[in-house]
Image (cartoon, rainbow, N blue to C red):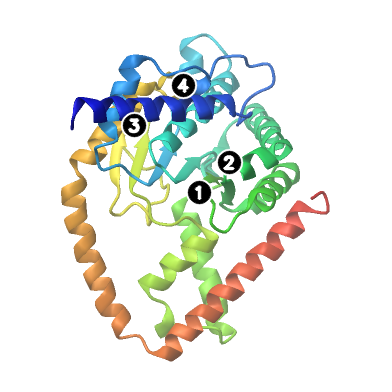
């Protein structure tokens, strides 16, 4: 590219960063935390150059965050475990703003595992209280997020959470729900893939029992569509911090073709350079993933061509029923405080 084109791209990136920094609202931020978010000031020159270089790369439109290492980060500093979660949730706002700047349109945040209920009660209480404050903060600023065209979605077995947490989660989704939002942020918890797949199997069995589906109607395509409503859609890039090289039973169905990036740092220590490295990792493997995606799409198209009109209509009816069922469930949990 020409020198003039380079300068133009850098100016565009600076203007975008300034625009986001001027309108940043509290996002998963603990009361009293005054640390400056990444995008509250103009980006330094080296960061502008990194972001400009990334603008020429193949970048993901969807990104999974497994923000691991928060308790270890706190322990290294002699602080109680919940301090690490407070630091991590403050950082998440900055990560989301950076991801938005780079074109990520769907983010999936692993906030609580089903197995986390086995942690000591004191830790669970701190986590639940922090979630309540975080969700209240977003709900109190929901007009801001709607103007920014952001929506929030909740995924997981919500009945496992205490009443006050699940009510806030559902209120959050209902308030910020937009059918075609520019950016969708998924809070996943209590969540585990084995647990979610078991719940899906029960729902599909009930649908067959009630005549909504035939056993032959249950296909890979139907499961993908089910996940878009009740779980999470397919993702392109997966980030896990703290050096752990495993998925921990998080979105295992949706990550079959995703680029997996394991970062050695604990999540609260992430910076711009770490996000840059992850994006480079994704871009470097884009050609091989594209070949895999092309083969998958061809196989899927051949399968879809064999479906009859009756099967297609039955699937549409089932998915419409599923969406109505979920919205009714959300409103019942959220109560009248809308």
As helix, strand or loop, the secondary structure at mark 1 comes to loop
Above or below: residue 204 compared with residue 45:
below
Mark nearest the camera among 2 and 4 is: 2
Of the image marks 2 and 1, the number of the one nearer the N terminus:
2
Tell me, yes or no, whether the two marked residues, 1 and 3, touch with CB atoms within 8 Å.
no
| Chain-order first, disc 2 or disc 4 | 2
Mark 1 or 4, nearer chain start = 1
In the image, which disc is placed on residue 33? none
Q: Residue furthest right?
A: 336
Mark 2 and mark 1: span between their CA atoms?
8 Å
- What count of labels does the image hold? 4
What residue sits right under mark 2 in the picture?
A: 148
Q: Nearer the viewer, mark 1 or mark 4?
A: 1
Looking at the picture, how far across and down is residue 34, in whole percent? Answer: 62, 14
Disc 2 on helix, strand or loop?
Answer: loop
Is residue 173 something that shows in the picture? yes
Q: Nearer the viewer, mark 1 or mark 3?
A: 1
The residue that disc 4 covers is 268
Of the two numbered discs 1 and 3 on the same chain, state the one appearing first in sequence. Answer: 1
Q: Quadrant of residue 51?
A: top left
Find out whether the residues at labels 2 and 1 contact each other: C-beta distance under 8 Å. Answer: yes
Which circle's residue, 3 or 2, is located before the other in the chain?
2
Labels 1 & 4 near each other (Cβ < 8 A): no
Answer whether labels 2 and 4 touch (C-beta < 8 Å). Answer: no
* Crowding near the residue tagged with mark 3, few <14, some 14–19, many ≥20 C-alpha atoms within 10 Å: some
Q: Where is mark 1, residue-wise? A: 182
Q: Is residue 4 above or below residue 176?
A: above
């Amino acid at each position: 590219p020409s020198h003039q084109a380079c300068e133009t791209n850098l100016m565009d990136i600076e203007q975008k960063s300034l625009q986001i920094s001027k309108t940043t609202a509290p996002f998963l931020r603990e009361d009293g935390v005054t640390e400056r978010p990444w995008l509250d000031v103009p980006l330094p020159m080296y960061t502008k150059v990194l972001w400009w270089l990334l603008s020429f790369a193949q970048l993901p439109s969807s990104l999974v965050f497994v923000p691991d290492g928060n308790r270890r980060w706190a322990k290294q500093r002699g602080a109680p475990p919940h301090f690490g979660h407070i630091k991590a949730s403050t950082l998440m706002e900055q990560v989301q703003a950076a991801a938005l700047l780079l074109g990520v349109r769907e983010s999936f945040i692993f906030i609580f595992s089903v197995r986390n209920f086995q942690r000591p009660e004191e830790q669970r209480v701190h986590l639940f209280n922090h979630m309540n404050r975080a969700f209240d903060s977003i709900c109190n600023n929901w007009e801001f997020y709607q103007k920014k065209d952001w929506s929030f979605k909740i995924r997981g077995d919500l009945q496992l959470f205490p009443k006050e947490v699940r009510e806030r989660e559902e209120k959050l989704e209902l308030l910020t729900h937009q059918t075609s939002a520019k950016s969708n942020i998924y809070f996943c918890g209590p969540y585990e893939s084995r647990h979610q797949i078991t719940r899906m199997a029960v729902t599909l069995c009930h649908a067959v029992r009630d005549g909504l589906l035939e056993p032959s109607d249950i296909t890979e395509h139907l499961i993908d569509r089910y996940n878009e409503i009740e779980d999470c859609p397919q993702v392109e890039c997966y980030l896990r911090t703290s050096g752990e090289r495993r998925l921990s039973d998080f979105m295992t169905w949706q990550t079959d073709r995703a680029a997996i990036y394991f970062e050695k740092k604990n999540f609260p220590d992430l910076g711009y350079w770490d996000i840059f490295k992850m994006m480079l990792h994704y871009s470097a493997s884009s050609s091989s993933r594209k070949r895999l995606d092309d083969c998958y799409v061809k196989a899927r198209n051949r399968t879809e061509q064999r479906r009859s009109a009756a099967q297609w209509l039955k699937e549409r009816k089932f998915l419409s029923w599923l969406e109505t069922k979920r919205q009714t469930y959300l409103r019942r949990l959220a109560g009248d405080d809308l």
